[in-house]
Amino acid sequence: MAFSIAEMILLGLLADWLFRKLRMPGLLGMLLLGVLFGPYVLNWMEPGFLETSSDLRMIALVVILLRAGFELSREALNKVGLQALLLSFVPGIMEGSAIAFLGPLFLPLTHMESALLGFVITAVSPAVVVPMMIGFIERRMGAKKGIPTMVIAASSLDNVIAIVILSILLGFYVGTTQSLAMTVAGIPISMLTGIGTGLLIGWLLLKIFERFNPRATKRMLVVLGISILLMHLQQLLKGIVPFVALLAVMAMGFIILEKREHMAHEISSKLGKLWVFASIMLFTLVGAQVDVSLALDTGLAGLGLVACGLVARSAGVLLALIGSPLSRAERLFTMVSFWPKATVQAAMGAVPLAAMQAAGMPTAPGSIILAMAVMSIVFTAPLGAVAIKLVGERVLEPASETTHAALDALSESR
């Protein structure tokens, strides 16, 4: 495994540098590197490395969620609160519903099976979107209207809603759903328990840090360790208490930023250095999950259905932004920011297939859903990443010098 890690670090850095030189997102190079070296193409990754893939990807995702939390200032959230809430569910539900309706026209699936497909591939990828938004935030691009902050907050909630709806539909399909009311009620409860737990733990950590004053590196390691434990706690509480760990992780960063901005920036800076390694692991291993032959099996019909879903999602973004202060160009940027799929699809693509196998049902629909999940990654991750970079660089306005000074003064006053 050590050899594969070293190999991915060196080649990942090279791929990142090369794609940046080509004025394309570096993560795209790392994704393609993972596809090439993964088990479905050259198969040059060690089995032990692939066996730990889910854990490594989870740790990397925790790092990026923490960084997102440390960038979610209350002032920025106040600007975009309503739009972030609408963006968290309107585009995803419109995309999932469109695929549920159109699926039988493109693929040998029923409307119910198409609905399962829709909510597998509707979730936007925080692994692709959040690092790019943080890059804009660090350069204070779009800061005046809080656009990157809005996208970060909405994309995280989008994932929660998509996964919960998929669980409800899958339960109905295989006949295991016990109570629709309880399952639906689990959506807000899981969000509240996640956010509440994160805020409480973040506040307790803040008191401990103030009492013992550890170095920033140790603070970062404590926050990271607790975040990983929260992800494990979500698995332990599954089926007992609705709980969303990714919201808890982000809420920890938020409360520390709110109470001690200087401390939050120190921890975020350390996480930024760790992200260099974590990003290579995340994107290469997500790429390694992509079975290109499966994507090709769906053909043009599958590609057409994914494209129809993106059209519906884009319409949902524009609908959610009605009444917002964003210009047409800024709405276009927000729209393309909700295109990329990767993380959830790599993790959840095989779930319907496994549930059908466990229930003794025909598995052909599950195989099609898995192939379409792969197709959505292959098509939307590169397209979305490139579109975010190209549109963002042209549309997002850097904060003025006056705004810079005001932000710096606010930081110093805290």
Image: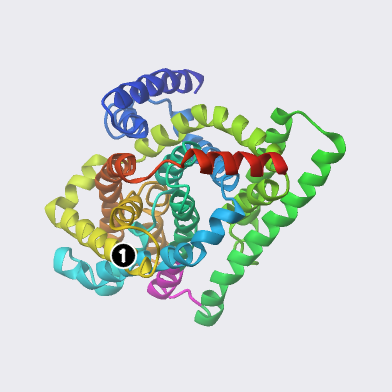
Magenta region includes residue 96:
no
Residue at 76 percent across and 28 percent down: it is: 215
Residue 302 versus residue 41 in the image, above or below: below
Location of residue 214 with respect to 255 vertically, above or below:
above
- Comparing 212 with 52, the one in front is 212
Q: How is the image coloured?
A: rainbow
Picture quadrant where residue 7 is located:
top left
Residue furthest to the right in view is 211
Q: How many marks?
A: 1
View extreme (front): residue:
402
Query: Where in the figure is residue 75, as x and y percent of width and height?
Result: 59, 55
Q: Give the residue drawn at x 34%, y 23%.
A: 15
Q: State the extent of the magenta-drawn residues as a range.
A: 165-177
* Image-quadrant location for residue 290: top left
Q: Main secondary structure of the magenta part?
A: helix
> Is 389 on the left-hand or right-hand side of 164?
left
Q: Amino acid at mark 1?
A: Leu
